[in-house]
């Protein structure tokens, strides 16, 4: 019997990403992922419901960071300023994960089902942010618009960040995307 090693979840993530990159998402099985990670398929299913979730396992933690940070911004901050502050904090969530994020994004972009799943996760995140803004007293449609704008800024900034070499941080790309949105909104 193999000796127990820590970080089964991280090893499964890495093995899945390697296999998805080598063979493609569709051609990779959960058994292959578990084997590559040095684990059993049963262990895989203790951590993930299916192979898609290996790519989206951090979604809940990301949502918590977004919601907790937005909820903790000063009540006096304008909604878009609260969102800007939140985006700055969220960028730290991705520190030291550029290469993983870049490879993950490539796998997602190569598969329509995964792109759809990504959009569903972003929509759910937007709804959670809008609810947080409403709890802060922001009325609709301002709460929904701010949440959707924040997610658009995050998505565009994130895609630009993973498309680069990783020398600049995600926060730089999020700031630039937010600045571009403000220019567009001002009609300049």
Image: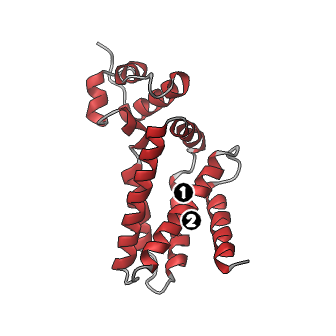
Mark count: 2
The spot of residue 75 in percent (x, y) is 43, 84
Asked whether 50 or 172 is in front, the reply is 50
Q: Which mark is residue 33?
A: none
Q: Residue at x 69, y 78 (%)?
A: 187
For residue 8, side relative to residue 103 (left or right): left
Mark 2 vs mark 1, CA separation in Å:
7 Å
Measured from the top left, where is residue 147 in percent x and y?
46, 69
Q: Give left or right: position of 72 versus 93.
A: left
Q: Quadrant of the C terminus?
A: bottom right
Residue 24, given in percent of the width and then of the height, sits at 50, 26
Q: Residue at x 69, y 74 (%)?
A: 183
Name the residue at the right extreme: 188
Q: Where 141 sits versus 46, above or below?
A: below
**Callout 1 environment at 10 Å: few (<14), some (14 to 19), or many (20+)?**
some
Q: Quadrant of residue 141?
A: bottom left
Q: Residue 7: x percent and y percent?
A: 38, 34
Residue at left 51%, top 83%?
78
What residue did someone put label 2 on? 88
For mark 1, give the secondary structure: helix
Give the side of residue 182 with respect to residue 141, left or right.
right
Q: Residue at x 65, y 54 (%)?
A: 169
Furthest residue toward bottom? 76
Quadrant where the image shows the N terminus: top left
By what rule are the colours in the image chosen? Answer: secondary structure
Residue count near mark 2 (Cα–Cα under 10 Å), binned few <14, some 14–19, many ≥20: some
| Residues at discs 2 and 1 in contact (Cβ within 8 Å) | yes
**Furthest-top residue in this view:** 1
Q: Quadrant of residue 116?
A: top left
Name the mark on residue 92.
Answer: 1
Q: Secondary structure at mark 2?
A: helix
């Amino acid at each position: 019997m193999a000796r127990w090693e820590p970080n089964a979840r991280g090893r499964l993530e890495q093995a899945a990403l390697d296999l998805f990159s080598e063979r493609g998402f569709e051609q990779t099985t959960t058994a292959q992922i578990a084997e590559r990670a040095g684990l059993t398929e049963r262990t895989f299913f203790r951590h993930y419901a299916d192979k898609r979730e290996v790519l989206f396992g951090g979604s809940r933690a990301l949502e918590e960071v977004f919601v907790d940070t937005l909820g903790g911004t000063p009540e006096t901050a304008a909604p878009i300023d609260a969102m800007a502050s939140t985006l700055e904090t969220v960028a730290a969530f991705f520190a030291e994960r550029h290469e993983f994020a870049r490879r993950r994004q490539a796998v997602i972009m190569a598969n329509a089902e995964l792109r759809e799943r990504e959009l569903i996760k972003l929509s759910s995140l937007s709804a959670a942010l809008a609810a947080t803004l409403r709890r802060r007293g922001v009325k609709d449609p301002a709460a929904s618009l701010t949440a959707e704008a924040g997610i658009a800024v995050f998505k565009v900034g994130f895609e630009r960040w993973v498309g680069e070499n990783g020398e600049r941080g995600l926060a730089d790309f999020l700031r630039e995307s937010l600045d571009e949105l403000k220019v567009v909104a001002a009609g300049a």
